[in-house]
């Protein structure tokens, strides 16, 4: 669970009011800013790639073009769904 530092103590207190017992409590902090930036960049790239596939598919006049691009387009969509 990711919680901004300024809300951490409140969130932890709220969780403790909900649970019956805490067997072990471990707190780990790390900066995930770079991970968020990388994920956002990846999502932007996949969206752009998907848009290119859609543009090509709209202009496709041969069925073989559609069949050749479909696996790549589907993979791109899977990555977008996984990342969003």
Image (cartoon, grey):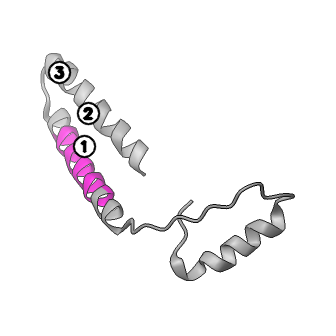
Q: Secondary structure at mark 1?
A: helix
In the displayed structure image, the side of residue 62 where residue 77 appears, left or right: right
Please tell me which residue lies in front, 35 or 21: 21
Residue at mark 2: 73
Residue at mark 1: 50
Identify the residue shown where x is 32% and y is 56%: 39
Q: Are marks 2 and 1 in contact (CB under 8 Å)?
A: yes
Disc 3 residue crowd, few under 14, some 14–19, many 20+, Cα 10 Å: few
Disc 1 residue crowd, few under 14, some 14–19, many 20+, Cα 10 Å: some
Residue at mark 3: 68
Q: Secondary structure at mark 3?
A: helix
Q: Which mark is residue 1?
A: none
- Marks 3 and 1, Cα distance to the nearest angstrom? 14 Å
Q: Are marks 3 and 1 in contact (CB under 8 Å)?
A: no
- Residue 24 is situated, as x and y percent measured from the top left of the image, at 71, 56
In the displayed structure image, the side of residue 28 where residue 32 appears, left or right: left
- The relative height of residue 10 versus residue 74 in the rendered view (above or below) is below
- The relative height of residue 80 versus residue 29 in the rendered view (above or below) is above
2 or 1: tag closer to the N-terminus: 1
- The relative height of residue 21 versus residue 80 in the rendered view (above or below) is below
Identify the residue shown where x is 14% and y is 35%: 59
Q: Which residue occupies the extreme bottom position in the image?
A: 6
Q: Which residues are magenta?
A: 39-55
2 or 3: tag closer to the N-terminus: 3
**Which of the 4 image quarters holds residue 52?**
top left
- Marks 2 and 3, Cα distance to the nearest angstrom? 9 Å
Is residue 43 one of those drawn in magenta? yes
């Amino acid at each position: 669970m990711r919680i901004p530092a300024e809300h951490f103590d409140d969130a932890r207190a709220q969780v403790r009011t909900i649970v019956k017992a805490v067997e072990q409590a471990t707190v780990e902090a790390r900066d995930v800013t770079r991970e968020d930036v990388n994920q956002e960049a990846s999502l932007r790239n996949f969206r752009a790639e998907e848009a290119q596939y859609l543009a090509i598919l709209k202009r496709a006049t041969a069925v073989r073009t559609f069949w050749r691009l479909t696996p790549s387009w589907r993979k791109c969509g899977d990555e977008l769904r996984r990342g969003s």
